Structures are given as structure tokens and as C-alpha cells.
Image: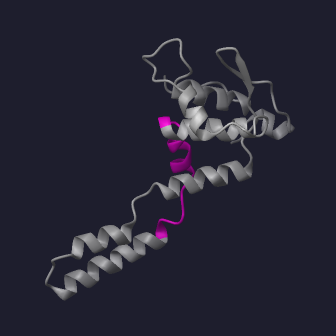
Amino acid sequence: MDGVCEVLGTDPEVTWEVGDRVFRLSMLTVDDWGEITNEVRKNRPDPVALGLRMVAGLENREDRVTILQQAWGEARKSQIVPQKEVFEWTTTPEGACFAMWKALQNRHPDLTLKEVRAMVRPVAQAGRGISHGEIVDLIDQVHGMPPTGPT
């Protein structure tokens, strides 16, 4: 993120109101982005497990070896998560909830991910919680950027 607030080292007053509760968001830290990246990595399919399923029942040894070598190579590459993939995940419903939870943890350390998920609502359920697009907008605002999230 290269928002103005990060450059200046400020944390703007961005709040999220849910019923009679008001929550203050903080900028996501390097550690937060690391945890978000780990979530992306954790939710990827395991290429080795996939490769093992693919070779089950294959009789040709050469085909099995080729498939498993490719799977092993993919597993080694899959440890690296491109920044673009991380940012894209934070615009999904699950990723937006996780990023919102991280943005809330600094000022609301007792708030759980489960509680944040319960407060987030599908866009169609007006009046209860918030949509994932609105979460993306709030996180952008906390980082000094204009709202751009999906609605």
C-alpha cells in the first residue's frame, strides 16, 4: 500500500458502526499483511496431494514420475504468494472479512474473526452489518486511499 497516511505515519479516524457499537480501524501493519499472505497460502490446494491423486491407478511409471515431479515443483513455487494475489483475495468476501478483522485487532483485541464474520452481511440484507465491498472501502480509507471496493 502506498497511501498518503502511511507515508506521513498517521492513522486516520475511520470507524465502522454496527448497531449501537462503534469500531475504530487501524492501518494494516507489515505483520498483518504477513498473516493475510499466510491465509492465502493456507487456502491454496496442495499440489503434491493433487499429484498423488492424479497418479493413483496410473500404470506407466514414467507418467507417474513426471506428474509427481511437476507437483513437487509447484509445491515449492506455491510458497511464494504474489502481492497481486494477496490484494485480490482481500476483495473476496472471506478475504475482506479477514482484512477487516486485522484492521480492527489493534484497537479491539478481543474481537474474534468469527464475530467480524457475523457482523458482515451479504449486500442483499440491507440494514444488518456491512458488505465485503464496503469493508474494502473502509480499509482503503484507513490507508489514505479513495474507496474503490466492489459493492
Would you place residue 68 above or below residue 132 in this image? below
Q: Which residue is at a point 58% across and 56% down the rendered structure image?
A: 38
Quadrant location, the N terminus: top right
User: What scheme was used to colour the molecule?
Assistant: one colour
Q: Which residue is at a point 55% across and 48% down the rendered structure image?
A: 86
Q: Position of residue 133 (x, y in %)?
A: 53, 26
Decide which of 15, 8 is in the foreground and name it.
15
Magenta stretch bounds: 77-93
Decide which of 10, 134 is in the foreground and name it.
134
Q: Can residue 86 be seen from the camera position used here?
A: yes
Does residue 70 appear left or right of residue 127 in this picture?
Answer: left
Q: Which residue is at a point 52% across and 29% down the rendered structure image?
A: 132
Q: Which residue is at a point 63% across and 35% down the rendered structure image?
A: 100
Is 15 in the magenta? no
Is 81 in the magenta? yes
Q: Position of residue 81 (x, y in %)?
A: 54, 58
Q: Quadrant of residue 118?
A: top right
Would you place residue 105 above or below residue 18 in this image? below
Q: Position of residue 97 (x, y in %)?
A: 56, 36
Decide which of 35, 89 is in the foreground and name it.
35
